[in-house]
Image (tube, grey):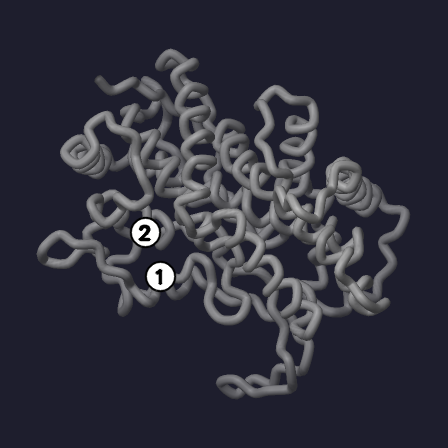
């Protein structure tokens, strides 16, 4: 949400190049995603077919993939540092204490009101300070073992840029404070979003068993029990279409993230002053009946042609569009496909016996910008 300008462009370019260097969009990242997919499968197996909530498991898997890129290694799920990170991320997305931080999205007058001393602000400040402290500890660990000839991960790449800085302005652009903010952005934007998309996908499988059966049949015919590969997505058009339909009908960021008018402008007769916050309604595009007939119906077939091949739709924009399109789009697509495929290959999912019909509305709140499903339990039966 930083202003669109030279610093934003510089960090956007650096982040994209660095993520690409560490495998995003390449097969070199697939091993890390597969490692977490296998760990997730084992966690699900340990439930022995009994009802459970998948939320923390999916968060663990997705967060650990980001950890492997940012910190150079994954955490064991019981590691105290990892549990601390997950707890902080959950507090960020679920705690009402963050409301004050986003009030200016409603009206700019809130930018000028003093909420200091309130319990809400106190908790919000402590939460972000704790996240910054966690990232600061990881940065210092890297600095102690930093070798400019052996760049291990995202933090090392940033430290190298610090070392290369030739003037005060360049050093200010690549300060430790800036690195902490970038790391927090990567975790906040990359964990809850992908984890919740997987939860939505499994929820739709349970309430649409005929779709789940078609996905199983396709996986069995193409893969059997061989380990999945991201390169095989072209051979699994129905599975790919199912994930596309999940992202259409339940975009995780329905209003994207706040943007701002770069200059005074007029749109459809409305005057929009420069720097006015703008929320882009992605949901309205995905639910437009002119673009997607019967938009409230879950229909993976809308992304298939008459020969059963997957067809991209230009109006499917869960990652946004334009200069601020999601930085981690390629990473998220690989994670979603590999984690969903691994789970569907090994399990059949159904609602616990006697459980009420789950809500399909989602628990979206404008103050967190994320649209997760309401809490639900499921049963996972191993497939032979």
Where residue 331 appears, as percent x and y from the top left, is 46, 49
Pick out the residue farthest to the right. Answer: 117
Work out how far the residue at label 1 is from the one at label 2, CA to CA, in angstroms: 8 Å
Helix, strand or loop at mark 2: helix
Where residue 241 appears, as percent x and y from the top left, is 26, 49
Where residue 164 appears, as percent x and y from the top left, is 75, 60
Location of residue 307 by image quarter: bottom left
Q: Which residue is mark 1?
A: 316
Q: Is residue 204 left or right of residue 220?
A: right
Q: Residue at x 69, y 29 (%)?
A: 84
Q: Residue at x 35, y 31 (%)?
A: 357
Task: Give the camera-side residue of 306 and 22.
Answer: 22
Where residue 273 appears, as percent x and y from the top left, is 66, 82
As drawn, 352 above or below 260 = above
Q: Which residue is mark 2?
A: 244
Helix, strand or loop at mark 1: loop
Q: Is residue 320 left or right of residue 74?
A: left
Q: Residue at x 55, y 34 (%)?
A: 64
As drawn, 141 above or below 180 = above
Q: Which mark is residue 73?
A: none
Q: Quadrant of the C terminus?
A: top left
Q: Residue at x 34, y 66 (%)?
A: 315
Answer whether residue 74 is visible to the viewer in this image.
yes
Sequence-first disc among 1 and 2: 2
State if disc 2 and disc 1 touch (CB < 8 Å): yes
As drawn, 153 above or below 76 = below
């Amino acid at each position: 949400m930083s202003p669109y300008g030279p610093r934003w462009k510089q960090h956007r370019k650096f982040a994209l190049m660095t993520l690409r260097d560490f495998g995003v969009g390449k097969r070199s990242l697939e091993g890390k995603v597969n490692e977490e997919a296998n760990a997730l499968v084992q966690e699900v197996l340990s439930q022995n077919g009994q009802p459970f909530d998948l939320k923390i498991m999916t968060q663990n898997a997705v967060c650990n993939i980001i950890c492997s890129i940012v910190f150079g290694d994954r955490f064991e799920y019981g590691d105290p540092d990892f549990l601390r990170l997950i707890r902080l991320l959950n507090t960020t997305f679920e705690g009402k204490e963050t409301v004050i931080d986003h009030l200016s999205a409603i009206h700019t007058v809130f930018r000028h009101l003093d909420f200091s001393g309130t319990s809400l602000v106190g908790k919000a400040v402590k939460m972000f300070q704790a996240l910054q402290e966690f990232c600061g500890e990881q940065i210092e660990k890297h600095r102690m073992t930093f070798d400019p000839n052996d760049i291990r991960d995202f933090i090392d790449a940033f430290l190298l840029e610090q070392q290369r800085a030739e003037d005060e302005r360049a050093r200010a652009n690549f300060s430790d404070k800036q690195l902490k903010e970038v790391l927090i952005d990567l975790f906040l934007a990359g964990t809850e979003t992908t984890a919740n998309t997987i939860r939505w996908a499994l929820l739709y499988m349970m309430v649409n068993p005929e779709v789940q059966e078609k996905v199983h049949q396709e996986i069995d015919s193409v893969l059997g029990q061989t380990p999945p590969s991201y390169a095989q997505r072209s051979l699994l058009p129905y599975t790919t279409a199912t994930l596309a339909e999940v992202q259409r009908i339940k975009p995780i960021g329905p209003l994207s993230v706040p943007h701002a008018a770069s200059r005074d402008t007029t749109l459809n007769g409305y005057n929009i002053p420069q720097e006015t916050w703008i929320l882009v309604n992605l949901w309205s595009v995905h639910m437009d009946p002119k673009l997607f007939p019967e938009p409230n119906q879950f229909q993976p077939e809308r992304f298939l042609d008459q020969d059963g091949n997957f067809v991209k739709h230009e109006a499917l924009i869960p990652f946004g569009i334009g200069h601020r399109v999601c930085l981690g789009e390629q990473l998220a697509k690989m994670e979603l496909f590999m984690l969903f495929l691994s789970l569907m290959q090994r399990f059949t999912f159904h609602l616990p016996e006697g459980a009420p019909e789950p809500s399909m509305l989602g628990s979206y709140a404008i103050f967190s910008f994320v649209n997760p499903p309401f809490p639900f339990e499921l049963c996972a039966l191993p497939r032979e």
